[in-house]
Image: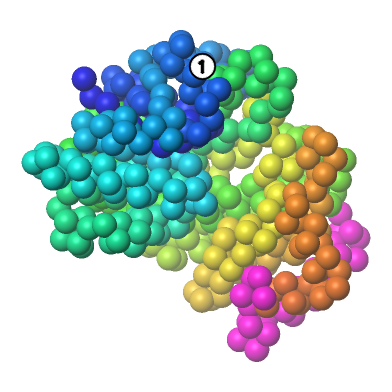
Amino acid sequence: MNKLLIFGAGKIGRSFIGQLFSCGGYEVVFVDVFKELIDAINARRSYPVIIKSNKGDDTLLIKNVRGLYLSDHENILHEIESVSYIATAVGQSNLPDIIPIIAKGIKNKLSKGYRTPTDIIIAENLRNAASYFKEHLLCYFTSEEINSYIGLIETSIGKMVPIMTKDDLDKDITQVFAEPYNTLILDKKGFINPLPDIPGLAPKENMKAWVDRKSFIHNLGHAAAVYYGFLKHPGSRYLYELLADQEIVDFARAAMIQSGKILQKMYPAEFSDTHILNHINDLIHRFQNKNLGDTVFRVGMDLNRKLGRNDRLAGAVHHGFTYGMAYDKILFALICGMYFRAVDEHGKLFPADVRFSRTLKTRGYKYILENLCGFDPTIHSNVYILSENYNIEVITQLI
């Protein structure tokens, strides 16, 4: 039987990667540190994905699964020797903890004469993920060994999975909520083994273009909606509440279209006008999914990352500047983001956003533009000129 070993039994691991491979006829073996979850998966050999749409809830039971504790190195190494496909869905900060285990397992596999390549599907929101992985693997393998025996497959994770409440988790620790969307965009060129014949996999030749599509349309649209929407409706908890306001929908769409044109300039052979517009309309429809219960806090929090130089908003503005394209709507969303102060269900700001707020208050928005967003006051003078018109007093008058 085909088998996938996946590090990370969290929301993306279970509702997306695990679901796709299980439904595609694979046994799925999860590796995680969460003992209670792994015990529950092993007891049932299944778990439910609650698919949230505006039509209501549907439950999909994911079968033929089991789990291992991350501390169970002996059995993990044995599993690595017997699989052609590994996946990670642990978050970038946890990758340094699992790469050595994966490397040791592949080394054991090769030392025993098993020359079947191992493809690693990197299901992380991480730019240049294959290069990151290879850099770490070079501590264990030569570049020739990596190129011959280890496939590094970047992905674009476009599936939305909301924060689950304590009551949800108490009801069933194995259940996970997700939207109906279930297409995994991944790098066709990264595979050494044949591409798995699984419905829902969407291999792409130019993976960088599709990673940027996720960042500069999907993530940017999320940001434009919540950052502008929060200032207009600061009491709203859910994304769909903001998007009940047509003005916010129109602004998010305009920012996404502006960024889409920049994306087409970056990759002229990859995305047509029709593709961009259809993708934007589909995303807005998905953002409005009331039953998904996606919160304003989740979508907008972590300003140091989301307003960063290469991320969704500042990154798009930089590219727009480079190509001489319009970026005023995107910049307006970025300035609104500086004043984003949504709180979680306990009434608390994201911890790093408290520090961000203090920095903004003491240093001002121009300091943020230069030191976080990466804009040079001389080179990007037009960014600063536009920003003068987007200070908080003007923004509050506009909304």
Residue 349 or residue 386, whichever sits in front = 349
Q: Residue furthest top?
A: 44
Q: Is residue 341 visible?
A: yes
In what element is the residue under mark 1? Answer: helix
Image-quadrant location for residue 387: bottom right
User: Tag 1: residue type?
Assistant: Ala
Q: Is residue 125 left or right of residue 88?
A: right
Residue found 41% across the figure and 13% down from its top: 45
Q: Residue furthest bottom?
A: 378
The quadrant of the image that shows the N terminus is top left
Tell me if residue 358 comes above or below residue 50 in the rendering: below
As for residue 200 lying within the magenta part, the answer is no
The spot of residue 128 in percent (x, y) is 40, 59
Q: 10 Å neighbourhood of mark 1: few (<14), some, or many (≥20)? A: some
Image-quadrant location for residue 374: bottom right
Colour mapping used in the image: rainbow
Tell me if residue 319 comes above or below residue 44 in the rendering: below
Residue found 55% across the figure and 14% down from its top: 58
Q: Is residue 16 visible?
A: no
Where does the magenta region start and end?
A: 371-399
Residue found 44% across the figure and 66% down from its top: 265
Residue 114 or residue 48, whichever sits in front = 114
Residue at the spot of label 1? 40
Image-quadrant location for residue 234: top right
